[in-house]
C-alpha cells in the first residue's frame, strides 16, 4: 500500500511525497507545516507518536485534509486521541499481499468510522464466510473472502498452498471480520490467533480493546497460553503509563465488567514495550511469559 498507493499513485498524479527516515513526530509535524502537506499516511505507532508529542508543538495540522492508517489495526483509543488533539479523523483500510494494494477503505465509503476498515473498494468483492462455507449474517464474525482483479494468481511453485486459499477465484484471507448493515467491515482477528478456552472462542482483539480502555494501560497484546484444565487460556502482555502501578485484580475486574468470565486473562505480564515489526505490526509469536 505504501509503495503502490501512497508513493506510486501520488507521483503518477503529479503530486509530491515527503519521506522521513527515521520517523519522529516533531520532525513530521515541522515538515507538514513547512510543505503544507495535505495527506498523512502512517501506521498506528506513528499516530500514537503524534498524539504524545510535546504540547509545545501545538494542536494544529492545518493543511492536512486526510489521514490514513494501515499495516496494523488502529485502536479506538489511538484514533480518538489523534482526532481530539489535531481535529483530523483517521481513515482505515485493509489489504494483504495476496490482494494488494487494498481491499477495503473507509475513504472509499466516504465517512470514517472508528474501529471500521470500511466497505470494499470499487471493483473488489468481499464476503464474510462461516466455518460451514456459507455467508454469515450482518453482525456475525466470518472469514474475509476476496475476489477481484487485485487477487493474486497463486503462490509460485506451490500449487497445494494455492489450492488451500483460492476457491473459484475467491481468496480466503484468514482474517475474521464482522459487517454492519451498510457493508462496513470491522476486523475481529486472525483465525490462527483464535484462543479456545474450554471450547469457547476468544479473539485476542476483543480483549485488547477492553484492556486499552483502562486508564493506566498504554498498549497491550493478548495470546493463548497453555492451561492444564481448559487446554488454552488467555494471557495478556501490558504496557503501563510511565510511573503507573496497577494491581492485577483491578485489570481483571475491568475486563470482567465488559466481557464473559472465560475471556478474562488468567496471567498478566508487564513489559516496557511490545515486539513489533518495522511496519508497526505486533509480533504475537514473539510474546514470551
Image: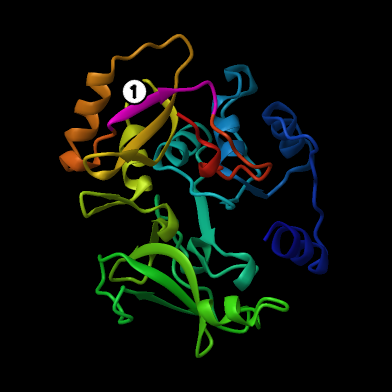
- Name which residue lies at 75% across and 66% down: 9
Residue 72 in the magenta stretch? The answer is no
Residue on which the image places disc 1: 215
What element does badge 1 sit on?
Answer: loop
The quadrant where residue 178 appears: bottom left
The quadrant where residue 143 appears: bottom left
Residue 271 in the magenta stretch? The answer is yes
Count how many numbered circles sit on residues in the image.
1
Quadrant containing the N terminus is bottom right
Give the left or right position of residue 7, taking residue 172 as reference.
right
The picture places residue 17, in percent across and down from the top left corner, at 80, 52
Query: Bounds of the magenta span?
Result: 266-273
The picture places residue 126, in percent across and down from the top left corner, at 44, 77
Quadrant containing the C terminus is top left
The picture places residue 209, in percent across and down from the top left corner, at 35, 41
- Judging depth in this view, the residue of 83 and 119 nearest the camera is 119
Up the image or down, 199 lies above or below 82; here it is: below
Q: Can I make out residue 228 in this image?
A: yes
- Name which residue lies at 24% across and 36% down: 264
Q: What is the crowding at mark 1: few (fewer than 14 residues within 10 Å), some, or many (at least 20)?
A: few
The quadrant where residue 32 appears: top right
Up the image or down, 129 lies above or below 72; here it is: below
- Name which residue lies at 53% across and 87% down: 169
- Judging depth in this view, the residue of 143 and 65 nearest the camera is 143
Amino acid at each position: 500500500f505504501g509503495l503502490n498507493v501512497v508513493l506510486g499513485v501520488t507521483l503518477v498524479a503529479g503530486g509530491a511525497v515527503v519521506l522521513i527516515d527515521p520517523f519522529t513526530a516533531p520532525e513530521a509535524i515541522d515538515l507538514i507545516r513547512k510543505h503544507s502537506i495535505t495527506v498523512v499516511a502512517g501506521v498506528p505507532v506513528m499516530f500514537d507518536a503524534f498524539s504524545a508529542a510535546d504540547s509545545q508543538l501545538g494542536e494544529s495540522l492545518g493543511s492536512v485534509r486526510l489521514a490514513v492508517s494501515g499495516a496494523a489495526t488502529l485502536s479506538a483509543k489511538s484514533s480518538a486521541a489523534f482526532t481530539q488533539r489535531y481535529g483530523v479523523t483517521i481513515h482505515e483500510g485493509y489489504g494483504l499481499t495476496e490482494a494488494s494494494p487494498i481491499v477495503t477503505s473507509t475513504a472509499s465509503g466516504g465517512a470514517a468510522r472508528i474501529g471500521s476498515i470500511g466497505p470494499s473498494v470499487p471493483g473488489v468483492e468481499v464476503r464474510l464466510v462461516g466455518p460451514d462455507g456459507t455467508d454469515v449474517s450482518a453482525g456475525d464474525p466470518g472469514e474475509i473472502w476476496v475476489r477481484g482483479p487485485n487477487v493474486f494468481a497463486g503462490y509460485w511453485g506451490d500449487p497445494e498452498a494455492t489450492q488451500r486459499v483460492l476457491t473459484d477465484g475467491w481468496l480466503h484471507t484468514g482474517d475474521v471480520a464482522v459487517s454492519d448493515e451498510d457493508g462496513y467491515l470491522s476486523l475481529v482477528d486472525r483465525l490462527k490467533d483464535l484462543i479456545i478456552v474450554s471450547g469457547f472462542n476468544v479473539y485476542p482483539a476483543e480483549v485488547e480493546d477492553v484492556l486499552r480502555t483502562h486508564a493506566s494501560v498504554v498498549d497491550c497484546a493478548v495470546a493463548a497460553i497453555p492451561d492444564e484444565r481448559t487446554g488454552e487460556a488467555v494471557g495478556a502482555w501490558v504496557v503501563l503509563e510511565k510511573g503507573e502501578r496497577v494491581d492485577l485484580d483491578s485489570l481483571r475486574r475491568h475486563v470482567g465488567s465488559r466481557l464473559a468470565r472465560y475471556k478474562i486473562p488468567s496471567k498478566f505480564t508487564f513489559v516496557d514495550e511490545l515486539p513489533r515489526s518495522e511496519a508497526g505490526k505486533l509480533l504475537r509469536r514473539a510474546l514470551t511469559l
